Every structure is written in C-alpha cells, then in structure tokens.
Amino acid sequence: MNISQYETFLKTIELGSLTKAAEVLGYTQSGVSHMLNALESDCGLKLMVRDRSGVRITADGQQLLPYFQGICNGQHNLSEKINEIHTLESGLVRVGTFTSVSAQWLPGIIKRFRGDFPNIQFELLHGTNEEIENWVINGRVDCAFVKIPTKQQLESIFLRRDPFVAILPENHILAKEPFLSAAALSEYPYIKLDESVDDGITEILESHHIKPNVCFVEKEDYAIIAMVDNGLGISVLSELVLKDTARKIVIKDLEFPADRDLGIAVKDKNMLTASAQKFLGYVQLWILEEYGPTP
C-alpha cells in the first residue's frame, strides 16, 4: 500500500467514476484500475463496487475511508511543513550563549534576522563555555557562541577578538594613568569573576604570574561593574561586556596583552536545519557590519 493508492481511491469515490478520476489524477483508466485492485488486494477487502452506473463505496470501504483521508491529509501537511522550513516560514533556532554576547550582539542579530524571517523562533540557553560546548555536542543547541579554539571537536567560525581591559572607579588614584599595571592588580582591592563563569581572565593573569588582591568574588559581570562603580575595587573584564555601559567607571588597557577569540560553533554544518544555517550567515554579516573586516 502507498499514498498514491489512497489518493486514487479517495478521488474515485469522490467523483464516482474511474474515468473521471483518471483524468483528474493524470493516469490512464487502466492505471487507476490497477492501483485500486492492488489496494483491495493489500487490504484483503472489497472497498468499492464498479458497475455501469459508476463506482460506489462498500461498507468496508466506508470504515477505512476516514483513515485513508487522514493519511493523505497528513502527507499534505507534512509536505507543506517541509516547504515552510525550506522557505523559512517556520522553524526554531536553539542558541547557546553567555552574558556579554546576549547583551551586546544577539539583540541586533536577532532583530535583523527576524526582520527578514519573522516566523522563526529562538531559544537561548545561557551557560559557561564548557556547558555550552557540551550542549552543541549532545544536540541540545543548534549552534553556540564560544571561546575558540574549542576544547571539544566542533566546527567553529571566528567572529572577533575581544580584549580584556581593566575597570576602575571614576575617582580612583590610577584613573588618569595611561594603562593599568600588573603591580596595581596585586596592590589594590580586586573583584574577581567567579571561576565557574571565568572568561579566561584567571588563566591570562596566571600566565603573567599575577596574583590579584582578591577581596570579592562575583558570578555576574554586571554586578562586578556596579561594585566598581561604587568604589569597592578594580577588576578585569572583557571589552564586549562593557560596551555602552552607563556606569561611572574608567576603562583602561592592561600593560600586558590579554584577549579572547570569540566564535560560533556547531557540531556539523551539514546537519543544521535550514533556519540555523541561515542564522549563521546573519551572525557573520552582522559582525562584519558592526566591526568591519577582521584585521
């Protein structure tokens, strides 16, 4: 049994004639007769009576009729849904992300994307870099913003190098210095980003043998910015998270090189949904327009 047999049966019953059904479906009359015979043989039932007056459905055929209709309607709906997905009339993009990207990049990217594809929905999952990579591996998300190179075997696209910078209260004694020294990090009260969400700052400080004078440990970037604004200490955060901040803080370069490379990662580009593939393109285009070509 196959969908063509069901459709032929339904059209024949609807029109009451093999000849008319053959004309509408684009088959020969013998072709229609063959499909109907095959359907009855597969079911082991007499589904219709054919005589000179036309075609009439049997009691057994009447019982199966709604099931054939359901299968054909389901096939039609499936074809429509597949077409919608290909034309991005519907879909869901699941994205792994973290605070700075969610605040500074995603609103602009999603606004641009949904301007062209308003029916695509988004699910955003926030986590640490390790958690996000695992979500990509196990299929929890379609794609994810990550620090690259990734620890997992993922396909990644470089987006932007994000410097780490120092932040100080506006009235800090070092506020007018051209940069913040390593010695200053060890001398003045330091507000540390918690290890569980550390963007790589601790690793960089340790590589330069710097031991900050840690007085507070906080999980949220924006809470650290507020604490610095209130004169509770100095800190080091990514430049991205500080974009457009209204807090009364001073942002300084560090005297040593410190940055992270940000990208977007997937498990296998070839296995992405049409909407997720399109989203990747919009991410790259938005970054290019926002920051210009990568040096």
Image (tube, rainbow, N blue to C red):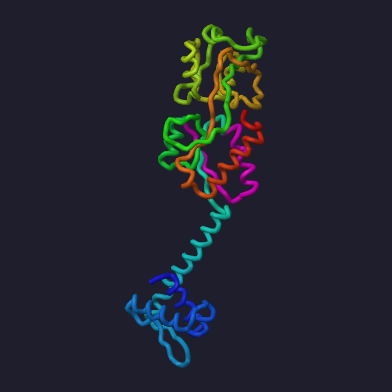
Query: Which x, y percent locates residue 170?
Result: 66, 14
- In the displayed structure, 263 sits above or below 65; it is above
For the record, the magenta segment spans 102-127
| Position of the C terminus by quadrant | top right
**Residue at the image position 45 percent from the left and 86 percent from the top:** 55
Query: Which x, y percent locates residue 181?
Result: 57, 9
191 to the left or right of 117? left
Nearest the camera: 66 or 252?
Answer: 252
Query: Which x, y percent locates residue 253?
Result: 61, 16
**Residue at the image position 48 percent from the left and 46 percent from the top:** 270
Nearest the camera: 269 or 98?
Answer: 269
Query: Which x, y percent locates residue 51?
Result: 43, 91
Residue 67 picture quarter: bottom left
Marker count (numbered): 0
Nearest the camera: 258 or 227?
Answer: 258
| Position of the N terminus by quadrant | bottom left
Using the rendered image of the protein, determine whether residue 207 is visible from the camera's viewpoint: yes
In the displayed image of the protein, which residue is found farthest to the front? 295
174 to the left or right of 52? right
**Residue at the image position 52 percent from the left and 8 percent from the top:** 186
- In the displayed structure, 138 sits above or below 26; it is above
236 to the left or right of 6? right
